[in-house]
Amino acid sequence: MPIGLCFGLLLGAAMEKRNLKKQKEIRKITSDEISAALDLAWRVFSEYESPDYSEEGIEEFRKCLHDEEYLAGIEYYGAFDAEKLVGTIGIRPDRKHICFFFVDGKYHRQGIGTRLFRSVLQDYPEQTITVNSSPYGVPFYHALGFEDSDKEQTVNGIRFTPMKYEGLAEVEG
């Protein structure tokens, strides 16, 4: 085997091993980790989404993050970089409705959101999943295969577009 080809194979194997180390772990969040997920949601909301909301909307979102009754019925998934939570998605299993979906800005455009959504799809295959997307999230949800089910609305200062995923499209990423 020519030395260049051998070196190329070794380099390729080393790069693949390095990429596996960089791969983020996706799993269900334990009850001890929910607080970190909600903190992440607030940080990302504050940075990327709050500019699209009125003071009323920002306060309404903050209240949701502290409403124990509302939060109790949510199933959470997380993306972890080593031990650090860098992304989270929360879904209401009874309604198949995404309530929270946030990825730390430093980790945007790395496929983490797509992988989080795929984890939900594994647990809810071929089912319709809904979300009330913020204006910031609409293009991302469209890329996942969601379609608008109604026009943008504002309720209690929260701007959102109702969307649905029919469970038939293949999620890329």
Image (spheres, rainbow, N blue to C red):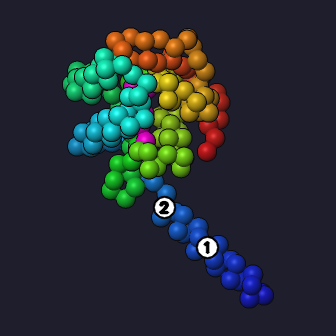
The residue beneath circle 1 is: 13
| Amino acid type of the residue that numbered disc 1 sits on in the rendered structure | Ala
| Alpha carbons under labels 2 and 1: distance apart | 14 Å
Residue 119 x %, y %: 48, 40
**Magenta segment:** 98-103
Q: In this view, does 25 lie to the left or right of 43?
A: right
Q: Earlier in the sequence, mark 2 or mark 1?
A: 1
Q: Residues within 10 Å of mark 1 (few under 14, many from 20)?
A: few
Residue 34: image tag: none
Q: Nearer the viewer, residue 62 or 48?
A: 48
Q: Which of these two is toward me, 26 or 107?
A: 107
Q: Please tell me whether residue 40 belongs to the stretch shown in magenta.
A: no
Q: Which amino acid does label 2 sit on?
A: Lys
Is 160 above or below relative to 121? Answer: above
Residue 82, relative to residue 171: is it above or below? below
Residue 87, image x and y in percent?
Answer: 41, 43
